[in-house]
């Protein structure tokens, strides 16, 4: 029977370790990472992307810098097509909103959420019916009665055409028997400015897109398009908190709508690459700056990753297809 000396065995063991090489390091970016915003500056998606950029930089959560790039052309199609065309490049993220669904359905631009790699849902965004602070209409009932009395004369400002703001506007019209003139703008920041300037009579901006104007006494919230009141009780403006805003349904306007704020990356991203960004975004959510954004913007703080997130996106696409069909917004078949 052959016997090996302890020195021989140690030599064999060492040779095996050397042959195996060092353990593979987890993936991380090797150059700057772009966050593509498929919308204009100042809107909810842009504000969230730039907040995340600031958090990652301040807390040194990543070795490489984050760069925010707005690509709003074609109702956001420009941004989505850019990421779709970057297969195998994991140094791109896109922050999503409802135009992930509405733009391909409404324009026929050739992309789908299935062309991208899902990373994480960071939150769901609320919508509020806003009027100018000098408007004589202080309740939903008063405002809807005024719009109904003058069909087509009241202007509703919103982001883009055949997108979430116009979908909500059509839903309001159908639920209340009213008719607005819808005025599209490039982003929620511009929409808020137009309401302050009285160029439109109302908007359905996200909370984060109009909170500065509310604090400044320039706009007034009438109701929130959610099934239940918002949970945030800190005073924001006029001695009121987000939780003081009634639901639209409780005011006789039976319309509900929430919107995705999440991330995708390029096609063909690997599991390690997705995992890096999931972990990065989880660290972002733990910072005080993120919590301030959530409170200021009255966000629903739902987090989803993996198969749960993918399944949610699939269901949301079906919901938007039904909503847009009902509104007459689906693109004609080519």
Image (cartoon, rainbow, N blue to C red):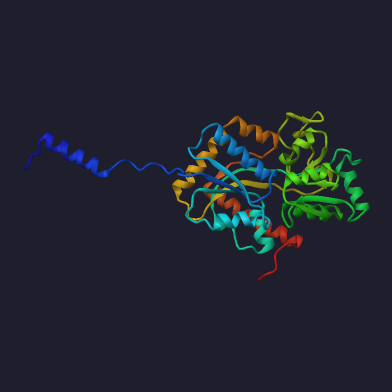
Position of residue 285 measured from the top left corner of the image (x, y, whole percent): 58, 35
Q: Quadrant of the C terminus?
A: bottom right
Q: Is residue 105 above or below residue 226?
A: below
Q: Residue furthest bottom?
A: 334
Q: Please say whether residue 244 is visible from this viewpoint.
A: no
- Residue displayed at 80% across by 46% down: 203
Q: Give 95 or 299, whichever is nearer the viewer.
A: 95
Q: Quadrant of the N terminus?
A: top left
User: Quarter-wise, where is residue 243 in the image?
Assistant: top right
- Residue displayed at 79% across by 43% down: 193
Position of residue 297 measured from the top left corner of the image (x, y, whole percent): 70, 37
Q: Residue furthest left?
A: 1
- Residue displayed at 70% across by 68% down: 332
Position of residue 161 measured from the top left corner of the image (x, y, whole percent): 74, 57
Q: Please say whether residue 157 is visible from this viewpoint.
A: yes
Q: Give 253 or 71, whichever is nearer the viewer.
A: 71
205 sits to left or right of 51: right
Q: Give 50 or 331, whichever is nearer the viewer.
A: 50
Q: Give 2 or 143, whichever is nearer the viewer.
A: 143
Count of marks placed on residues: 0
Position of residue 168 measured from the top left corner of the image (x, y, whole percent): 76, 52
- Residue displayed at 59% across by 59% down: 112
């Amino acid at each position: 029977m052959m016997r090996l000396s302890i020195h021989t065995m140690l030599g064999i063991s060492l040779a095996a370790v050397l042959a195996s090489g060092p353990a593979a390091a987890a993936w991380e970016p090797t150059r700057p990472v772009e966050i593509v915003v498929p919308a204009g500056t100042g809107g909810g998606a842009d504000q969230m992307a730039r907040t995340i950029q600031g958090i990652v930089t301040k807390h040194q959560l990543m070795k490489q810098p984050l760069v925010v790039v707005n690509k709003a052309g074609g109702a956001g199609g420009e941004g989505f097509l850019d990421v779709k065309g970057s297969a195998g490049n994991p140094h791109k993220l896109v922050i999503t909103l409802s135009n992930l669904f509405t733009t391909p359905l409404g324009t026929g631009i050739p992309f789908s959420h299935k062309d991208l790699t899902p990373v994480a849902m960071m939150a769901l965004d609320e919508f509020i019916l806003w009027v100018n602070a000098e408007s004589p209409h202080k309740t939903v009932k008063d405002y809807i009665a005024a719009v109904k009395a003058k069909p087509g004369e009241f202007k509703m400002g919103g982001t883009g055409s055949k997108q979430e703001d116009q979908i909500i506007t059509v839903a309001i019209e159908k639920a209340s028997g009213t008719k607005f003139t819808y005025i599209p703008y490039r982003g929620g920041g511009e929409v808020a400015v137009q309401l302050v300037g009285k160029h439109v009579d109302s908007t359905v901006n996200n909370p984060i897109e109009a909170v500065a104007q509310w604090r400044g006494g320039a706009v007034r919230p009438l109701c929130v398009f959610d099934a239940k009141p918002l949970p945030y009780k800190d005073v924001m403006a006029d001695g009121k908190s987000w939780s003081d805003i009634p639901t639209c349904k409780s005011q006789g306007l039976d319309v509900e709508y929430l919107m995705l704020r999440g991330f995708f990356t390029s096609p063909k991203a690997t599991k390690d690459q997705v995992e890096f960004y999931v972990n990065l975004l989880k660290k972002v959510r733990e910072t005080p700056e993120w919590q301030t954004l959530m409170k200021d913007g009255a966000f629903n703080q739902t987090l989803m990753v993996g198969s749960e997130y993918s399944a949610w996106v699939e269901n949301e696409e079906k919901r938007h297809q039904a909503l847009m069909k009902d509104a007459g917004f689906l693109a004609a078949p080519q």
